[in-house]
Image (cartoon, rainbow, N blue to C red):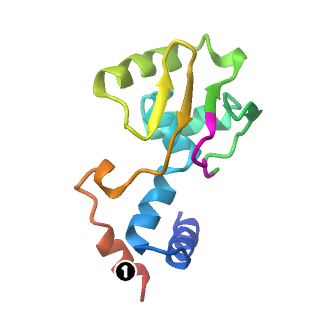
Amino acid sequence: MEKQFRSYYAEADRKKGITGENLLQMLESRLDNVAYKMGLGGSRTEARQIVRHNSILVNGKRVNIPSYQVQPGDSISVADQSKDQLRIKSALEAADERGLPEWLEVDVKKLTGIFKNRPERDDLPSTINESLVVELYSK
């Protein structure tokens, strides 16, 4: 949503460093995105739904807010009652084939992962032109 994205931009602008990179790191650190990158959902929408349906634990505590900011060192796992869901298992298989990012450590058998660190700009797709977003929102 526009209002939420504006608040992300404002927060990225307040932080030290390059605003565009800060914004991308914040967006990549959202719980729904981390769940998708771990392979717990076949798409970002599906990963968001998995988070909303109380299927994800962060450091052993149930979190159902897709915009939750995952911090480096946080452990993300699938709740026990959700480990048998076929959609999670099939999404994990698909993610294992496409590869997992270096900033995540995932144990596919235990359905757990660790958010090692925030992704650097080199770890993200080069098709994203964050300078255009910064230019638009800095007005």
Per the image, the residue denoted by label 1 is 136
Q: Secondary structure at mark 1?
A: helix
In front of the other: 5 or 37: 37
- Image quadrant in which you'd find residue 58: top right
Residue that appears at 46% across and 66% down: 22
Q: In this orientation, which residue lies closer to the viewer: 3 or 72?
A: 72
Magenta span dominant secondary structure: loop
Q: Position of residue 3 (x, y in %)?
A: 57, 71
Q: Residue shown at 63%/40% (left/top)?
A: 74
The verdict on residue 73 being magenta is yes
Direction left: furthest residue: 127
34 shown above or below 1: above
Q: Amino acid at mark 1?
A: Leu
Horizontal arrangement in the rendering, residue 57 relative to residue 1 (left or right): right
Along the viewing direction, whichever of 46 and 108 lies nearer the viewer: 108
Task: List x then y, in percent, for residue 47.
Answer: 52, 35
Residue 89 lies, with reference to residue 57, above or below; the image says above
Number of on-image labels: 1
Residue drawn at point x = 41 percent, y = 50 percent: 119
- Relative to 127, 48 lies left or right: right
Instruction: Find residue 133 and report its horizontal and vertical position in percent.
Output: 36, 72
Say if the magenta span includes residue 6: no
**Quick one: quadrant of the C terminus?**
bottom left
- Residue at 67%, 27% (x, y): give it: 55
Residue bounds of the magenta highlight: 69-75
Tell me residue 15's x, y (percent): 54, 74
Please, is residue 134 above or below residue 102 in the view? below
- For this orientation, the residue located farthest to the bottom is 139
Would you call the spot at circle 1 few (<14 residues within 10 Å), some (14-19), or many (20 or more)? few
